[in-house]
């Protein structure tokens, strides 16, 4: 496979971008004329939260060549205004740095936007009817795919193939659970995949069976690859369209940068991430079609390939595309009862969850990746898996010596007593997803029991108090990409159907929540020199909110996105800002 950066110099890549149709929309730095000394854009009359501790608030900002020239009051930036400067009046609106979603599966999310949507379905009948409606528009023999179901919303009963077999006799079906670690196949899909009573569980996965040993249609973690190997490959044109669809959606929520964690579940093909890199992101970057900044993580099994690529072209391919690091999995998810725990699940006394990657293999891969200078991120949800990865990271750091490595644990949802201080002591970034607690609270209490669930779940405040750094995100498409709602979730922690906070002592304040989506998120992927705060020299990525009082924003935690700017250009707008 041709990896595009290997064949183009930085200069050649810039020329391609310059000549691309529409490149001026997203690459203002290439079109800048050096003889212009003033700002390209000046925004004024706002309440600008800079995210810079040295100067946290301002009312005006000057921007040139897509970067911030100066921030302060209007009198200080006035000297930057020239005859060619575009002026925009914020009319007192609150402005924050562009949000950074620290954990998404971006192309996958864009693809799933075009599939059957099962989020929020709370009755078996509704589930079946959604499938029936969708399959009515499908030609016989074509696959029907959907996403987002959550059995906890209809009482906990897991769906089985017989629910939908009668209405899908000629169409194979695959419907993934909201967490992405379990899915339902109909009987035709099971047949096409060759899944029978005699099918063995793959390492790190489970084929669910009934009392007779027959597959029910449910597949967990690595077992899902048995189905994925049968689903026709998505065309490159569809994946490119998915990038644009996902980008527009993210921009409407104020997200200007995402950290794309690539493959969606343990056992997925490592080639998926590399194909998206070359065929989708690489193509969009070189043709000037990127709308949002993306930092890419690749399967840890391919660390040598990434190391070679970074040695050839560097980690920054453009101001839109960055090579981040490598990612792996330690366990599954709580909703699928595959998160790795010390004590068994309450209703499954023989089930402690799944260790989806052999620990010796994971250690060796992490050791090699870290020695090569790559950043490592590992998915860990259960208390046992988090301790296991903290132990692993400590051993690797000891073996390879001191450096700025910024190890990450993705999710860190359920922690054992005594685990929290280790994040700060070992300088581990906790990459967490606040909106998931809205769906997990009832499930956690049911699966772990009140004492375990309330004592160790989503410990945001404790982690911060222990000097850990939080990077906030969504894990989209597991939950919706929506930083403002996520910020509110981290501050209020009120699950759906509840009238009070879940573990109120773990609520964090507005500044910590905003930092988790901006400067701390930037640090978590080595982008803090480029983005994360509205500071001179950094990218001019910012979001204009609907509120015009910081106190109101802090008190109500309620706002919407009016405009999103990337590199000083408006990439999304509700057309409520007056141009002066």
Image (tube, helix red, strand yellow):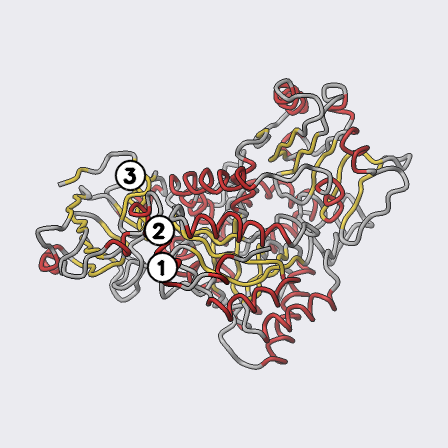
| Image height of 176 relative to 308, above or below | above
Quadrant location of the C terminus?
A: top left
Residue 313 horizontal/vertical position (percent)? 47, 66
Residue 452 horizontal/vertical position (percent)? 66, 53
Which dot marks residue 546? 3
Number of the front mark, 3 or 1: 1
The Cα atoms of the two marked residues, 2 and 3, are separated by 15 Å
The Cα atoms of the two marked residues, 2 and 1, are separated by 8 Å
Residues tagged 2 and 1 counted as in contact (Cβ below 8 A) = yes
Kind of element beneath mark 2: loop
Kind of element beneath mark 1: loop
Q: Residues within 10 Å of mark 2 (few under 14, many from 20)?
A: many
Q: Earlier in the sequence, mark 2 or mark 1?
A: 2
Q: Earlier in the sequence, mark 2 or mark 3?
A: 2
Which dot marks residue 98? 2
| Image height of 360 relative to 461, above or below | below
The Cα atoms of the two marked residues, 3 and 1, are separated by 23 Å
């Amino acid at each position: 496979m041709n990896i595009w950066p290997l064949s183009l110099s930085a200069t050649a890549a810039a020329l391609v971008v310059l000549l691309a149709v529409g490149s001026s929309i997203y690459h203002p730095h290439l079109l800048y004329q050096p003889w212009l000394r003033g700002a390209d854009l000046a925004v004024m009359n706002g309440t600008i939260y800079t995210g810079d501790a040295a100067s946290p608030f301002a009312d005006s900002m000057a921007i040139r060549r897509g970067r911030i020239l100066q921030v302060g009051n209007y009198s200080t930036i006035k000297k930057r205004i020239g005859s060619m400067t575009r002026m925009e009046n914020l009319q007192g609106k609150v402005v924050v740095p562009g949000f950074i979603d620290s954990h998404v599966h971006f192309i996958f999310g864009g693809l799933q936007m075009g599939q059957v949507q099962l989020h929020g379905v709370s009755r078996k009948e509704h589930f079946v009817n959604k499938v029936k409606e969708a399959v009515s528009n499908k030609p016989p023999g074509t696959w029907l795919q959907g996403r987002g179901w959550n059995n906890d919303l209809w009482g906990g009963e897991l769906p089985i193939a017989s629910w939908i077999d009668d209405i899908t006799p000629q169409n194979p079906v695959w419907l993934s659970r909201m967490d992405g670690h379990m899915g339902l196949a109909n009987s035709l899909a099971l047949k096409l995949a060759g899944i029978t009573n005699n099918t063995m569980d793959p390492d790190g996965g489970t084929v669910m069976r009934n009392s007779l040993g027959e597959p029910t249609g449910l597949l967990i973690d690595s077992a899902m690859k048995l189905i994925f190997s049968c689903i026709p490959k998505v065309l490159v044109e569809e994946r490119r369209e998915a990038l644009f669809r996902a980008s527009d959606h993210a921009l409407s929520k104020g997200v200007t940068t995402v950290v794309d964690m690539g493959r969606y579940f343990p056992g997925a093909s490592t080639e998926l991430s590399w194909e998206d890199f070359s065929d989708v992101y690489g193509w969009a970057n070189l043709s000037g079609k990127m709308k949002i900044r993306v930092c890419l993580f690749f399967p840890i099994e391919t660390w040598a390939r990434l190391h070679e690529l970074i040695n050839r072209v560097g980690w920054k391919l453009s101001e839109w595309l960055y090579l981040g690091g490598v990612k792996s999995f330690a366990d599954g998810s709580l909703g699928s009862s595959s998160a790795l725990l010390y004590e068994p699940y309450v209703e499954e006394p023989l089930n402690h969850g799944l260790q989806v990657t052999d620990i010796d293999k994971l250690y060796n891969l992490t050791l090699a990746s870290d020695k090569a200078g790559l950043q490592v991120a590992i998915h860990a949800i259960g208390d046992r898996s988090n301790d296991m990865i903290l132990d692993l990271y400590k051993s690797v750091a000891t073996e390879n010596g001191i450096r700025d490595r910024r190890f990450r644990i993705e999710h860190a949802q359920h922690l054992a007593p005594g685990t929290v201080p280790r994040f700060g002591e070992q300088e581990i970034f906790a990459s967490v997803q606040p909106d998931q607690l809205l769906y997990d609270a009832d499930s956690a209490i049911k699966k772990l029991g009140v004492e375990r669930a309330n004592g160790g779940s989503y410990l945001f405040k404790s982690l911060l108090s222990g000097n850990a750094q939080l990077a906030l995100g969504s894990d989209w498409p597991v939950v919706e990409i929506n930083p403002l709602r996520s910020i509110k979730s981290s501050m209020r922690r009120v699950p759906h159907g509840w009238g009070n906070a879940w573990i109120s002592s773990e609520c964090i304040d507005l500044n910590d929540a905003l930092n988790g989506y901006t400067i701390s998120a930037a640090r978590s992927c080595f982008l803090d020199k480029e983005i994360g705060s509205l500071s001179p020299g950094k990218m001019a990525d910012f979001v204009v909110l609907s509120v015009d009082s910081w106190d109101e924003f802090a008190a109500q935690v309620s706002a919407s996105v009016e405009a999103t700017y990337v590199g000083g250009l408006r990439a999304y707008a509700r057309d409520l800002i007056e141009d002066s």
